[in-house]
Amino acid sequence: MDPAVLRDDMVDSLVHPSKGCVQSDDIAGAMRSVPRDAFVEDERAAYADRAFERFGTRVLAPSTAARLLEALAPDSDDSVLVVGVGVGYTTAVIAEIVGSRQVQAVDINRQLVYEARDNLSGAGYAEVLVDCRDGADGLPEYAPYDRILLEAAAVRPPEALLNQLSEDGRLVMPLGTATQSISVVDSDGDVQRLGSCAFNPMLVEGEQANTVERNRTHREDREFAERDARRRKGWELDWIDWD
């Protein structure tokens, strides 16, 4: 089937009151324009409303991406930072609205950075800058930002990201650990919670799926597996003062 038809069907389902994920004309139009099959290999599956795994990260379902985009509400002249670019689809939708040169993105996983660059270039958004960074540090060289989208959960908004917002800017992120909500945070740190969600935690250096580890013994493998089953990761650790 023609990908454009699949795209229209996908957006129609997100606009329909039964889901109601897409409400703005800008976001609906951008999602109709961005070829999601450039970011998800299986053309038919690309337009199904479900998530995928790729290089150790979750590719958001279209409805989840739409909820984040509606909360972000980017305008045509906004400068935008995406933290946790993943395969680049959400970033492409934002670039369709504000322009590719107005969007920067970072990811802690270098393999995903290369993947996102290739995908964005193939989809027509080659001018989006994608860099390998610890997301909690943001991208201060291009700040301030009118909008920052964090596509991973954290126990509190990273201070560096709040500092990189413009005076009237907004940070959109999944806030919380076991119980999360899509939240809008302004430059003063005031939080508006918009609804429940479930995202993977924001990782810190050394927790990437492609991190190289030394060879371990069988006993160490068991010990590491038991430890990892019990512990939280990255920004789930609410006993750390991330500021």
Image (cartoon, grey):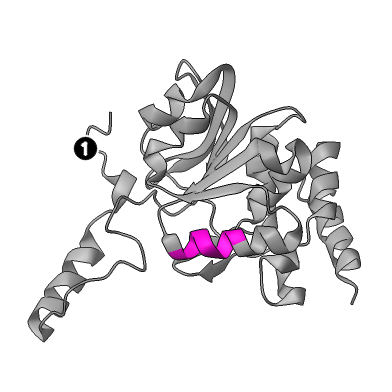
Q: Residues within 10 Å of mark 1 (few under 14, many from 20)?
A: few
Element carrying mark 1: loop
Q: Is residue 112 magenta?
A: yes
Mostly what secondary structure, the magenta segment?
helix
Q: Residue at x 63, y 40 (%)?
A: 103
Q: Is residue 151 visible?
A: no
The percent coordinates of residue 85 (x first, y second) are 54, 52
Quadrant containing the C terminus in the rendered view: top left
Amino acid of disc 1: Ile
Q: Is residue 213 magenta?
A: no
The percent coordinates of residue 213 (x first, y second) are 21, 71
Q: Is residue 29 visible?
A: yes
Quadrant containing the N terminus in the rendered view: bottom right
Q: 190 above or below 179? A: above
Q: Residue at x 61, y 35 (%)?
A: 80
- In the image, the segment drawn in magenta is 111-117
22 displayed left or right of 109: right
96 displayed left or right of 83: right
Residue bearing the label numbered 1: 240
Furthest residue to the bottom?
218
Q: 166 above or below 240? A: above
Q: 136 above or below 6? A: above
The percent coordinates of residue 67 (x first, y second) are 66, 43
Picture mark count: 1
The percent coordinates of residue 197 (x first, y second) are 53, 47
- Which is nearer the eye, 59 or 78? 78
